[in-house]
Image (cartoon, rainbow, N blue to C red):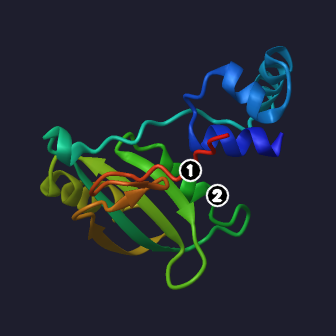
């Protein structure tokens, strides 16, 4: 199962027949493994990596570091769940180190994100402080280079 998960994490668009060959299994066995991976919640969905800058679409991302007060009964879970419920929020991650939660926000403008932080995120109970960093350029994401062409590292063996 782990090998299947690694393969689809790297390229979720691989045809079932190709996955089966790579796993040395039949397509039916591979399909059953895929069904099990979804049923058990190992696979939560698929995501396309879009280069919005190249596509000419205005898109702004911000990473917001939050210091919060955890609740006695549920720790960070309740505040993280409240933050995750906002439609503007893409990701909420519990972190170790200098802050508690890392929140990824996506919007159409810097002002839209700044207003979200000021009017909706900062006023939440248990949010002690925020620190916002705006993404300026993506060079590599999800293992894929965004600048320049990716190189094909497969080797060709001629017999």
> Under tag 1, what secondary structure?
helix
Residue depicted at x 84% and y 19%:
26
Q: Is residue 89 left or right of residue 2?
A: left
Q: Please tell me which residue lies in front, 150 or 14.
A: 150
Q: CA distance from mark 1 to mark 2?
A: 6 Å
Q: Counting other residues with Cα less than 10 Å from the Cα at mark 1, is it few (<14), some (14-19), or many (20 or more)?
A: few
Q: Position of residue 140 (x, y in %)?
A: 38, 60
Mark yes or no: residue 25 visible.
Answer: yes
Vertical position of residue 83 compared to residue 17: above or below: below
> Under tag 2, what secondary structure?
helix
Q: Is residue 81 left or right of residue 147?
A: right
Vertical position of residue 12 compared to residue 100: above or below: above
Vertical position of residue 90 compared to residue 18: above or below: below
Residue depicted at x 43% and y 36%:
48
Q: Is residue 80 left or right of residue 52?
A: right
Q: Position of residue 130 (x, y in %)?
A: 36, 73
Mark yes or no: residue 83 visible.
Answer: no
Q: Position of residue 59 (x, y in %)?
A: 20, 47
Q: Position of residue 156 (x, y in %)?
A: 58, 45
Q: Which mark is residue 81?
A: 1
Residue depicted at x 27% and y 57%:
147
* Mark 1 touches mark 2? (CB < 8 Å): yes
Q: Please tell me which residue lies in front, 104 or 30.
A: 30
Q: Please tell me which residue lies in front, 68 or 46.
A: 46
Q: Is residue 86 left or right of residue 29?
A: left
Q: Quadrant of residue 19?
A: top right
* Residue at the extreme bottom of the image, as rendered: 98
Residue linked to disc 2: 77
* Residue at the extreme top of the image, as rendered: 28
Residue depicted at x 61% and y 55%:
78
Split into 4 quadrants, where in the image is the C terminus?
top right
């Amino acid at each position: 199962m782990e090998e299947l998960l690694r393969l689809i994490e790297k390229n979720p668009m691989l045809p079932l027949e190709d996955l089966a060959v790579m796993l040395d299994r039949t397509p039916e066995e591979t399909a059953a493994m895929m069904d099990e991976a979804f049923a058990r919640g190992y696979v939560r969905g698929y995501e396309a990596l879009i280069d919005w800058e190249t596509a000419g679409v205005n898109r702004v991302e911000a990473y917001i570091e939050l210091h919060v007060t955890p609740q006695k009964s549920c720790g960070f879970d309740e505040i993280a769940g409240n933050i995750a419920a906002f439609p503007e929020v893409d990701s909420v991650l519990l972190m170790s180190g200098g802050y508690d939660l890392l929140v990824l926000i996506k919007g159409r403008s810097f002002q839209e994100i700044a207003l979200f932080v000021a009017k909706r995120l900062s006023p939440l109970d248990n949010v002690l402080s925020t620190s916002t960093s705006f993404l300026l350029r993506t060079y590599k994401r999800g293992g894929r280079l965004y600048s320049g062409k990716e190189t094909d590292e497969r080797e060709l063996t001629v017999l």
